[in-house]
Amino acid sequence: MGKREDVPSILLEKVFTVDNENSCLRYGEIHRVKMRLKELLTTPTDTTVDVESSPGGDNKILAVAATTDFFVGEEVLVDEGESHEVTYTIASIQDDISLTMTEVLAYTHEVGETVAQAGLNKIRTPDTYPVIHYHLFVKRQTGTEYLLLFTKKHIYLWTGELEEKFECSAFCENWEVVSYNDKVIATNDVDKVLVWDVIPSNDFIFLDDPVNGIEYETGLYLTKAKHLIVFENYLILGNVTESAEVYPQRIRWNAIGDEKQ
């Protein structure tokens, strides 16, 4: 008999972790996590045209009664179901005065015409910056799920509203986040490596020494890391900064099962 070559020779638990993006492990099964998580969506907001706005010249400004919950880059549907129905994209907002579109106005929009967000929209972060990373964590001891959102300036915990859990010392371009030892470890290559003990009232703090960073030898500290993964119960940091020197090819790892050693 021949040997089948399509049978996996590695266990699923060796190639899948709960940190894999766009997926999560629940009850021993892999489930897809969509980028637009239902927890982060709101029902559409609408307003009305406040002052007649005509398409003369290159006019892109639509005067409206209110601008609350509208944001730059989203599509709005004007005069739905009526003779002036058209979709625009918001380029800028003058609070409670007007919406400036990327397109020239297609019609003369009259006072009272509706201006509505087109479909469900993502919740706006308190710092107004877009989410560049999210992390879904399931606490082993309780089975409770926690959803974390990361922008270039903050970390937020979703509890029905967004609660700030950390403020970066400067803007960052990327976050890498893992679940480890029933905690959340995060790095942004700007601040020291962070840890959250998954107590909702607590904030993220610096891992190991709160002032100096991670002590890898007596008196020597790792202060930044660009990359972060978990493998075989080791927490592995890559592209690190130590004693103000950047080592792009260097990796550091902890004592097995202990993020502080």
Image (cartoon, rainbow, N blue to C red):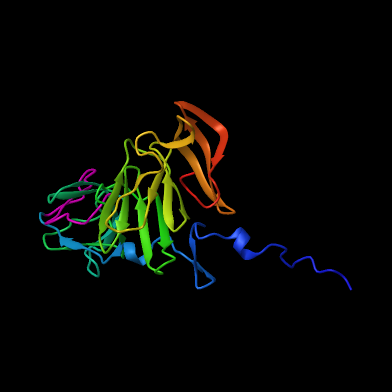
Up/down of 116 relative to 92, above or below: below
Q: Position of residue 259 (x, y in %)?
A: 47, 48
Looking at the rendered structure, the number of numbered marks drawn on it comes to: 0
Name the quadrant containing residue 35. bottom left
Residue stretch rendered in magenta on the structure: 52-72
Query: Relative to 59, is 7 on the left or the right?
Result: right
Tell me which secondary structure the magenta stretch mostly adopts: loop
Name the quadrant containing residue 135. bottom left
Q: Nearer the viewer, residue 202 or 158?
A: 202
211 within the magenta span? no
Residue located farthest toward the front when viewing the structure as drawn: 218
Residue plotted at (39% across, 61% down): 36
Q: Nearer the viewer, residue 24 or 137?
A: 137
Up/down of 41 relative to 185, above or below: below
Q: Position of residue 241 (x, y in %)?
A: 47, 31
Up/down of 86 relative to 95, above or below: below
Q: Position of residue 254 (x, y in %)?
A: 53, 44
Q: Nearer the viewer, residue 22 or 112?
A: 22
| Quadrant the N terminus occupies | bottom right
Q: Position of residue 222 (x, y in %)?
A: 46, 34
Query: Relative to 14, is 123 on the left or the right?
Result: left
Residue plotted at (26% across, 67% down): 43
Residue located farthest toward the right when viewing the structure as drawn: 1
